[in-house]
Image (cartoon, rainbow, N blue to C red):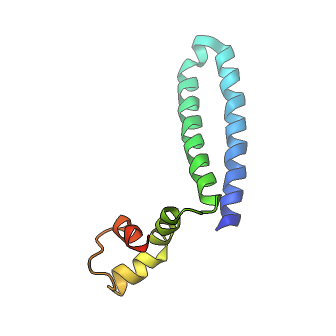
Amino acid sequence: MAGQASIALRLILNAERGLGIARRALVALGERGAPLLRRVTETLRGLRRVRQETEATLKPATEPKDIAQRIADGHAYDNHVLIQKKFPEVQSREDFAKLIE
């Protein structure tokens, strides 16, 4: 997982650089580049959000709450709560994270 996330992060960074260059070129076009500039800017914002999420995935969890949430977001919820029904009081991944914590 971490290997795939690092590859994704490198690709996102490259795409951000490319879109940054395209954005500067569109600004230079002035009014003619305005419609495309808006789309490029929106895409760049979306990529930045994805990059932040990817970086958070690569960051090791150290706080009990973060560790509990990662466990709840993984296969443990599906396996132990949904399939094996070991925790009937748990109604959501958030409930499961609170129980783990």
Q: Residue at x 59, y 47 (%)?
A: 52
Which of the pair 97/52 is nearer the observer?
Answer: 97
Q: Nearer the viewer, residue 90 or 99?
A: 99
The residue sitting at 65% across, 17% down in the picture is 27
**Residue 68 location in percent, x, y?**
48, 68
Q: Give coordinates of residue 72: x percent, y percent.
A: 44, 70
Residue 97 at x, y percent in the picture: 41, 68
Horizontal side of 51 relative to 66 (left or right) equals: right
Percent coordinates x, y for residue 15 in the rendering:
68, 42
Relative placement, left or right, of 46 versus 87 is right
Whether 81 is drawn above or below 69: the answer is: below
Quadrant (top left/top right/bottom left/bottom right) for the N terminus: bottom right
Q: Which corner quadrant holds the C terminus?
A: bottom left
Image-quadrant location for residue 47: top right
Q: Relative to 17, say whether 90 is above or below.
A: below
User: What residue lies at 64% left-to-right and 58% top-to-bottom?
Assistant: 59
